[in-house]
Amino acid sequence: MTATEAEGQARLASTLATDGYLDDGRLRDAFEAVPRHLFLPDRVWLDDSTASTGYVLVDRVSDPDRWWAAAYSDVSVVTQIDDGAPEPLDDHWATPTSSASRPSVVALMLAAADLRPGQRVLEIGTGTGFNAALMAHLVGEAHVTSVEIDPRISAQARASLAAADCHVRIVCADGEGGVPSRAPYDRVLATASLLRLPQEWVEQTAEGGLIVAPWETAMCPHGMVRLTVRGGRASGRFRTPVTFMTLRGQRHRARLAEMFTDEAWEEARHRGLGSRPALLGDDDARFAVGLRLPGVHYWEQAGTGHWLCSEDSWALIDDDAVHQWGPRDLFDEASAESAWWEDAGRPHVHDFGLTVTPGGHTAWLGTRESGPSWPLFG
Ligand SMILES: C[S@@+](CC[C@H](N)C(=O)[O-])C[C@H]1O[C@@H](n2cnc3c(N)ncnc32)[C@H](O)[C@@H]1O
């Protein structure tokens, strides 16, 4: 490693440590030992608010300063957009579909997974292979299995791991099925976000083992669950929210364009707004309402207002009016759930939990035994 590379790596570890992400000394050792740049391709996409798609392509050869700065900064480095399209498919929008996640987020998730030497770990979403290499440092390379759905990303990760002299098992498959041939695992760690936990992950986790995964609902893209598996059931609380790209098979999109027509606007029920529900301005409220109303999308759009959208209905909330269309009064439903959240004492993300059994997903508030609980999907 050159002096510049070593200096970049030390600087990143030091930044993360100063910001409180590497309190566990073993985690700090791992970040100091694994060079992130070895896992980044020469051409990467970086966040850039001046670019029409929000991302700019940066080439290591033609713009080395920017490439190296990204490699050793606490930023996510996007390595694939639009499932491998050479250019964004839309002039105004690029969807990141693989990345080296932001190092502080990687550290948060590894800390939640509480990895110990000798534990068998399954990672879902190999991506660049950087996280797999960090895990190998923590548990031993023979104990790490990582599964990636995209063949090109998987092949690139294999090559990067080989270049880093790290010999973990890389599998190219849909990780929603886990990797049964290497089960059971003491830890299952997803680095792509879920709306539903695959039962296979529970079945492949050893008794007392942990599943750590980014969690999202259609309403709120931020979340993280840490579930302990016992007796075929996975249960635990939500943790500090993180945001990841969604597992391929669980991607979802609001169907507003098909339903928001001139005719629908004529038919819509229009009225004054009155008081504004907390969910329009509070992340904790939106997280809670997302758990109460799965399948209802929410977003705010400059110039129009706040939108809610389900399979068959939509609502628009602008400065002083509400417009609702379809069989569901989505604004009224969301407002009622937002009022429930206020009545419950405005609980934080960490106050909620999730239990997954072969029979389904149950969300709860407070404790699983005594708090209010409700089925997540019907
Ligand atoms: C944020 S990246 C992972 C970052 C990675 N852990 C790293 O260290 O670079 C998410 C990855 O999950 C992969 N992915 C999405 N759905 C998947 C699935 N069903 N099974 C396996 N991998 C999946 C994507 O192709 C992408 O490479």
Image (cartoon, helix red, strand yellow):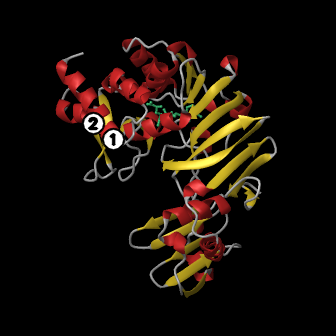
Q: Where residue 110 sits in the image (x, y, percent)?
A: 49, 33
Count of numbered circles in the view: 2
Who comes first in sequence, dot 1 or dot 2?
A: 2
User: What's the residue type where badge 2 is placed?
Assistant: Ala
Number of residues whose C-alpha sits closer than 10 Å to that of mark 1, classed few (under 14), some (14–19) or many (20 or more):
some
Q: Is residue 109 above or below residue 309?
A: above
Quarter residue 102 falls in: top left
Give yes or no for contact between labels 1 and 2 (Cβ–Cβ under 8 Å): yes
Q: Going 33% across and 43% down the picture, which residue do you hit? A: 19
Find disc 1 in the rendering and name its residue: 75
Q: Going 50% across and 15% down the picture, which residue do you hit? A: 141
Task: Depth check: give the residue in front, 366 or 327.
Answer: 366
Q: Going 20% across and 17% down the picture, which residue do you hit? A: 2
* Image position of 165 (left or right of 352): left
Find disc 2 in the rendering and name its residue: 70
Task: Depth check: give the residue in front, 269 or 296.
Answer: 296
Q: Where residue 159 sits in the image (x, y, percent)?
A: 41, 15
Q: Which quadrant of the rendered structure holds the N terminus?
A: top left
User: What's the residue type where badge 1 is placed?
Assistant: Val
